[in-house]
Image (cartoon, rainbow, N blue to C red):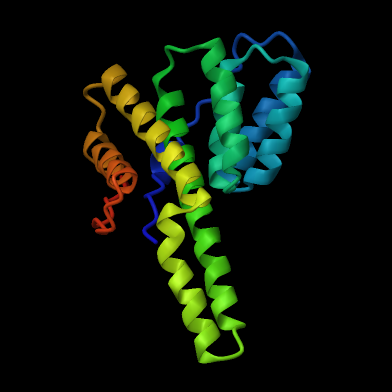
Protein backbone atom coordinates (compact mmCIF):
# COMPACT_ATOMS: atom_id res chain seq x y z
CA UNK A 1 0.00 0.00 0.00
CA UNK A 2 1.05 3.57 -0.55
CA UNK A 3 3.26 5.03 2.14
CA UNK A 4 2.71 8.58 3.30
CA UNK A 5 5.83 10.60 2.69
CA UNK A 6 8.15 11.06 5.62
CA UNK A 7 9.56 14.56 5.34
CA UNK A 8 12.83 13.87 7.07
CA UNK A 9 14.41 17.20 6.19
CA UNK A 10 11.66 19.01 8.05
CA UNK A 11 11.44 16.59 10.96
CA UNK A 12 15.13 16.93 11.67
CA UNK A 13 14.78 20.65 12.29
CA UNK A 14 14.37 19.81 15.96
CA UNK A 15 15.83 22.65 17.98
CA UNK A 16 16.87 21.69 21.47
CA UNK A 17 16.33 24.78 23.61
CA UNK A 18 18.44 24.35 26.70
CA UNK A 19 19.30 27.96 27.47
CA UNK A 20 16.72 28.24 30.25
CA UNK A 21 17.31 24.82 31.76
CA UNK A 22 18.71 25.16 35.27
CA UNK A 23 19.14 21.49 35.92
CA UNK A 24 22.54 20.54 34.52
CA UNK A 25 21.63 16.85 34.26
CA UNK A 26 18.64 17.69 32.06
CA UNK A 27 20.77 19.99 29.92
CA UNK A 28 23.40 17.30 29.49
CA UNK A 29 20.80 14.70 28.50
CA UNK A 30 19.24 17.03 25.93
CA UNK A 31 22.61 17.95 24.47
CA UNK A 32 23.57 14.29 24.19
CA UNK A 33 20.22 13.51 22.56
CA UNK A 34 20.88 16.24 20.00
CA UNK A 35 24.20 14.57 19.13
CA UNK A 36 22.52 11.19 18.67
CA UNK A 37 19.82 12.80 16.53
CA UNK A 38 22.46 14.31 14.23
CA UNK A 39 24.10 10.89 13.87
CA UNK A 40 20.79 9.22 13.08
CA UNK A 41 20.87 7.13 16.27
CA UNK A 42 17.25 7.77 17.17
CA UNK A 43 16.92 4.96 19.71
CA UNK A 44 19.73 6.42 21.82
CA UNK A 45 18.27 9.90 21.41
CA UNK A 46 14.90 8.61 22.61
CA UNK A 47 16.49 7.07 25.69
CA UNK A 48 18.21 10.36 26.61
CA UNK A 49 15.10 12.43 25.97
CA UNK A 50 12.91 10.11 28.02
CA UNK A 51 15.43 10.33 30.87
CA UNK A 52 15.32 14.10 30.52
CA UNK A 53 11.53 14.09 30.83
CA UNK A 54 11.78 11.87 33.90
CA UNK A 55 13.84 14.62 35.52
CA UNK A 56 11.90 17.61 34.17
CA UNK A 57 8.54 17.09 32.45
CA UNK A 58 7.92 20.81 31.84
CA UNK A 59 10.13 21.28 28.76
CA UNK A 60 7.94 21.25 25.66
CA UNK A 61 11.06 21.08 23.45
CA UNK A 62 11.97 17.72 24.98
CA UNK A 63 8.54 16.30 24.17
CA UNK A 64 8.86 17.60 20.62
CA UNK A 65 12.30 16.12 20.08
CA UNK A 66 11.26 12.81 21.62
CA UNK A 67 8.35 12.74 19.17
CA UNK A 68 10.66 13.49 16.24
CA UNK A 69 13.17 10.83 17.31
CA UNK A 70 10.38 8.29 17.73
CA UNK A 71 8.98 9.01 14.26
CA UNK A 72 12.39 8.47 12.73
CA UNK A 73 12.77 5.24 14.74
CA UNK A 74 9.33 4.18 13.43
CA UNK A 75 7.99 4.03 17.00
CA UNK A 76 4.79 5.84 16.12
CA UNK A 77 2.84 5.09 19.32
CA UNK A 78 5.67 6.63 21.34
CA UNK A 79 5.79 9.62 19.00
CA UNK A 80 2.05 10.23 19.31
CA UNK A 81 2.25 9.98 23.09
CA UNK A 82 5.20 12.39 23.33
CA UNK A 83 3.76 14.97 20.94
CA UNK A 84 0.37 14.95 22.66
CA UNK A 85 2.20 15.43 25.96
CA UNK A 86 3.99 18.46 24.56
CA UNK A 87 0.77 19.96 23.20
CA UNK A 88 -0.64 19.95 26.74
CA UNK A 89 2.27 22.19 27.78
CA UNK A 90 2.49 24.43 24.72
CA UNK A 91 -0.55 24.13 22.44
CA UNK A 92 0.54 27.13 20.34
CA UNK A 93 3.73 25.43 19.08
CA UNK A 94 2.73 24.69 15.48
CA UNK A 95 5.37 22.05 14.79
CA UNK A 96 3.70 19.72 17.28
CA UNK A 97 0.71 19.41 14.96
CA UNK A 98 2.84 18.80 11.88
CA UNK A 99 4.88 16.02 13.49
CA UNK A 100 1.80 14.55 15.19
CA UNK A 101 -0.01 14.43 11.86
CA UNK A 102 2.93 12.62 10.28
CA UNK A 103 3.15 10.14 13.16
CA UNK A 104 -0.56 9.36 12.97
CA UNK A 105 -0.44 8.89 9.20
CA UNK A 106 2.56 6.57 9.41
CA UNK A 107 0.95 4.57 12.25
CA UNK A 108 -2.13 4.11 10.04
CA UNK A 109 0.08 2.87 7.20
CA UNK A 110 1.83 0.52 9.59
CA UNK A 111 -1.48 -0.97 10.73
CA UNK A 112 -2.59 -1.61 7.15
CA UNK A 113 0.80 -3.00 6.13
CA UNK A 114 0.73 -5.47 9.01
CA UNK A 115 -2.81 -6.59 8.12
CA UNK A 116 -1.84 -7.11 4.48
CA UNK A 117 1.36 -8.90 5.44
CA UNK A 118 -0.58 -11.36 7.58
CA UNK A 119 -2.94 -12.12 4.70
CA UNK A 120 -0.02 -12.63 2.34
CA UNK A 121 1.66 -14.96 4.82
CA UNK A 122 -1.57 -16.93 5.18
CA UNK A 123 -1.87 -17.18 1.41
CA UNK A 124 1.75 -18.28 1.07
CA UNK A 125 1.30 -21.10 3.57
CA UNK A 126 -1.98 -22.34 2.05
CA UNK A 127 -1.61 -25.98 1.05
CA UNK A 128 -3.58 -25.83 -2.19
CA UNK A 129 -5.09 -23.48 -4.73
CA UNK A 130 -8.54 -23.58 -3.15
CA UNK A 131 -7.16 -22.56 0.23
CA UNK A 132 -5.12 -19.82 -1.40
CA UNK A 133 -8.21 -18.51 -3.18
CA UNK A 134 -10.11 -18.40 0.11
CA UNK A 135 -7.31 -16.42 1.71
CA UNK A 136 -7.04 -14.04 -1.23
CA UNK A 137 -10.80 -13.51 -1.11
CA UNK A 138 -10.37 -12.49 2.52
CA UNK A 139 -7.94 -9.84 1.36
CA UNK A 140 -10.84 -8.07 -0.31
CA UNK A 141 -12.46 -7.74 3.08
CA UNK A 142 -9.51 -5.83 4.56
CA UNK A 143 -11.36 -2.63 3.66
CA UNK A 144 -14.04 -3.48 6.22
CA UNK A 145 -11.70 -4.87 8.85
CA UNK A 146 -10.96 -3.58 12.29
CA UNK A 147 -7.48 -2.72 11.12
CA UNK A 148 -8.84 -0.41 8.45
CA UNK A 149 -11.22 1.21 10.94
CA UNK A 150 -8.33 1.96 13.30
CA UNK A 151 -6.23 3.26 10.42
CA UNK A 152 -9.06 5.50 9.20
CA UNK A 153 -9.36 7.08 12.66
CA UNK A 154 -5.65 7.83 12.64
CA UNK A 155 -5.81 9.23 9.09
CA UNK A 156 -8.68 11.51 10.15
CA UNK A 157 -6.72 12.78 13.16
CA UNK A 158 -3.66 13.20 10.94
CA UNK A 159 -5.54 15.34 8.43
CA UNK A 160 -6.95 17.49 11.24
CA UNK A 161 -3.55 18.07 12.81
CA UNK A 162 -1.84 18.83 9.51
CA UNK A 163 -4.64 21.27 8.67
CA UNK A 164 -4.21 22.93 12.06
CA UNK A 165 -0.49 23.32 11.34
CA UNK A 166 -1.29 25.07 8.05
CA UNK A 167 -3.73 27.36 9.81
CA UNK A 168 -1.06 28.28 12.34
CA UNK A 169 1.61 28.64 9.60
CA UNK A 170 -0.25 29.73 6.45
CA UNK A 171 3.00 30.62 4.69
CA UNK A 172 4.70 27.29 5.44
CA UNK A 173 7.27 26.46 2.76
CA UNK A 174 6.15 22.82 2.76
CA UNK A 175 2.45 23.70 2.33
CA UNK A 176 2.06 21.85 -0.98
CA UNK A 177 3.52 18.66 0.44
CA UNK A 178 1.32 18.84 3.53
CA UNK A 179 -1.78 19.43 1.42
CA UNK A 180 -0.87 16.30 -0.56
CA UNK A 181 -0.65 14.32 2.69
CA UNK A 182 -4.04 15.67 3.80
CA UNK A 183 -5.50 14.68 0.44
CA UNK A 184 -4.02 11.19 0.74
CA UNK A 185 -5.56 10.81 4.22
CA UNK A 186 -8.96 11.98 3.02
CA UNK A 187 -8.83 9.56 0.09
CA UNK A 188 -8.10 6.71 2.50
CA UNK A 189 -10.94 7.75 4.81
CA UNK A 190 -13.36 7.90 1.86
CA UNK A 191 -12.28 4.47 0.69
CA UNK A 192 -10.63 5.71 -2.49
CA UNK A 193 -8.23 2.99 -3.58
CA UNK A 194 -6.64 5.19 -6.21
CA UNK A 195 -2.98 5.69 -5.39
CA UNK A 196 -1.78 9.24 -5.66
CA UNK A 197 1.72 10.09 -6.75
CA UNK A 198 4.00 10.60 -3.76
CA UNK A 199 4.82 14.19 -2.93
CA UNK A 200 8.41 15.29 -3.13
CA UNK A 201 10.36 16.00 0.02
CA UNK A 202 12.27 19.19 0.69
CA UNK A 203 15.98 18.91 0.35
**Quarter of the view holding residue 139:** bottom left
Q: Is 58 left or right of 179, judged from the image as shown?
A: right
Q: Where residue 88 sits: x, y (%)?
A: 55, 13
Q: Where residue 48 sits: x, y (%)?
A: 72, 33
Q: Is residue 61 visible?
A: no
Position of residue 100 relative to residue 150, above or below, is: above
Position of residue 169 relative to residue 11, above or below, is: above
Image point (56%, 91%), residue name: 128
Quadrant occupied by the N terminus: bottom left
Q: Where residue 122 sits: x, y (%)?
A: 59, 75
**Quarter of the view holding residue 10:** top left
> 152 or 64: nearer the eye?
152
Q: Residue furthest bottom?
A: 128
> 94 or 161: nearer the eye?
161
Q: Where residue 117 sits: x, y (%)?
A: 54, 67
Position of residue 133 relative to residue 41, above or below, is: below
**Quarter of the view holding residue 198:** bottom left
Q: Is 86 left or right of 36, judged from the image as shown?
A: left
> 197 or 154: nearer the eye?
154
Q: Is residue 8 visible?
A: yes
Amino acid sequence: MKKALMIVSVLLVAVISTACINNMAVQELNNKAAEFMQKGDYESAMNRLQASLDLDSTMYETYYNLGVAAINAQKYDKAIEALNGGIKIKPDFADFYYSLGLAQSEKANQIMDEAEQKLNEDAATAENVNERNVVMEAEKRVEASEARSDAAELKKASAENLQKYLEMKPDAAERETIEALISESNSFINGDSEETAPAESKE
